[in-house]
Image: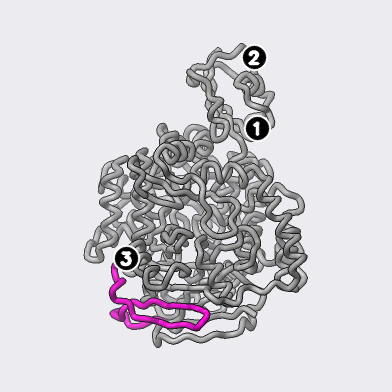
Amino acid sequence: MARLLRIDTKNRTSAFENMGAYAGLGGRALTSRLVLNEVPALCHPLGAANKLVAAGGILTGTAAANSGRISLGAKSPLTGGIKESNSGGLFAQKMAKLGIQAMVFEDKPADDAAPVVVVVTAGGVSIVEAPELAGLGTYAASEKLLAKYGSRAALMLIGPAGETCRMAASVQFTDPKGRPARAAGRGGLGAVMGSKKIKAVVVDDTDAPGVPVADKEAFKAANKRWVEILGSHPVTSQGLPGFGTAILVNIINEAGALPTKNFRFGRFDHAADISGEKMVELMNARGGKPKEGCHPGCVIQCSQTYVDEKGGYLSSGLEYETVWAFGANCLINDMDDIARLDHACDDLGLDTIDMGNAVAVAMDGGIIPWGDSKAALALLHRVGDPSDSLGRIMGNGAKFAGQAFGVSRVAEVKGQALPAYDPRAVKGVGVTYATTPMGADHTAGYAVCQNILKCGGDVNPMSKAGQVELSKNLQIATAAIDSVGFCLFVAFAVLDTADAVQVMCDQIAAVTGVKFAPEDFLALGVNTLKDELTFNNNAGFTTKHDQLPEFFSEPLSPHNTSWDFTPEELQGAKVL
Amino acid sequence: MHISVKCFATLAKHTPDGADRFEVADGSTVADVIATLGIPAEAVKIVFLDGVAAAPNAPLGDGCRLGIFPAVGGG
């Protein structure tokens, strides 16, 4: 049976524990239940009482296609509420194969303690002081760690931003090529890891026992159908592998929902220059790699290796959100510099969405000129210098930057910056931004699917009708998918395929040997959301926090629609 | 009349020369343009007419903006 691994970061000891009351939970269901039960809702997120949980999903470590995701959970230093931050990379599957459902990092050492590396193998756990890694970017740290611990190691690590407890600090994970380019970006969990003086966690699955499967024949049959489902839907089998997530630039722009110049307009004149189509054209011409997966068993392969004109590596995992945040929102149309900004965020360990918003806020505040990509890069790099106060400000994300620079136009909910869809032109995702326990978060209930992409339904994006129900249902389904360990992009196929939920349930039942039906899948999602909403209520969140900034009541061109939901109208999207 | 028409993603190769001023017969519909550009109807998932999702039989107006997409997704 899988177990919990608890790490006492103050005494630098560790202990394995049975799942107990957490039996059957995985991924986000596990992180949120544990945080609700064990983290005092009013604690300081950087204090000893906060816990950082890293959990694989219920199917993680099995051969189920696209099941290698990891969930990180804690009280967020950015929002002050509960956070689940999700990532790809190698770490989750190796941890699962070692028989570990989750690692729980507890307590904290003295603030001047040296950073440590936690090493987890089939032979046990060691916690090693690593002052030589202090202050290193994640790329340099990864190179050293992989050289030391070998090619079967996978890493979870923070950069200088996490070490200085910046509120927009990410946790990075290594990909199949050893690059720390996968990010658990949102909500500042890198700061929680930094507050506990954990620079990196190393997992090596050599001689690992693997994840037991109760009914191998049933699992094989279900996974075969699952692979068929993912392989036959046009989004998962052509769109995403063909162009990556930046394929969205042109369509969101066409829909008039691409936030431009700090959420002033819905279209960007240079959208084509920063689109997925453009990226693929450049990668093909320059010897980059337009199609890659971020973990073994991924059949969608939406990632890439993006290179400069000489074929030199610029970045990987260059997502639509990042291209938008540093691109249209900052009036930058230099694709190569956007890739450099992405790489800087991976290396420093920062959330690209909050940082893109922070850069736009800095431009609005006159700190650097609009559209100046070189100035944006220089500003971002300052986060790596702990003695640089402007760097410290920027690393804290968009809301803090707005306060520092006297800028009132800051797109955030519950302290977390908005993603790449203007809620006035995609009202369904606006409902999610306002009501998810996560703060402004698009993946939590991706109504863009039905509002714009005509996937899983068709709901007019500029009308209020049907949006609350849509967001609620998507939030439930997403919380469930996040608990199973699946990449959320399976949803494009699942929403359009009648037997897909049953097939996911069949895989789960076959692995665990316990009955699992669609009603259990829904309950997984509902109960996870209930835990999160309960935590947030205990942390002091009220109905009043479920709203968008007031400037969204201004009309957005080209459609001249405005945000017209009240917090009371939005409550129907919440399960509690 | 003249419209602007762009095709995207796997359909990008169907974007015509002079896309910003593409001539179509008065009374043309979205489906007429798709056929003229040689795009198989089943390959088209979403069409935006002046930024609003449009059905194949939607009539075009002079100076309108057409965006033609296959099934796409992302995050």
Circle 2 is placed at which residue position? Answer: B27
- Which sits in the foreground, A373 or A442? A373
Using the rendered view, name the quadrant where residue A47 is placed: bottom left
Q: Report if residue A575 is visible in the image.
A: no
Percent across and percent down for residue A439 are 50, 59
Work out whether disc 2 and disc 3 sit on a shared chain.
no
Q: Residue at x 48, y 69 (%)?
A: A152
**Callout 1: helix, strand or loop?**
helix
- Which sits in the foreground, A72 or A285? A285
Q: Residue at x 65, y 32 (%)?
A: B43
Circle 1 is placed at which residue position? Answer: B43
Start and end of the magenta stretch? Answer: A108-137
Circle 3 is placed at which residue position? Answer: A160
Counting the numbered discs, the total is 3
Q: CA distance from mark 1 to mark 3?
A: 47 Å
| Contact check, label 2 and label 3, Cβ < 8 Å | no
Identify residue type, mark 3: Pro
- Quarter containing the N terminus of chain A: bottom right
Label 2 vs label 1, nearer the camera = 1
Task: Report whether B36 appears left or right of A412.
Answer: right
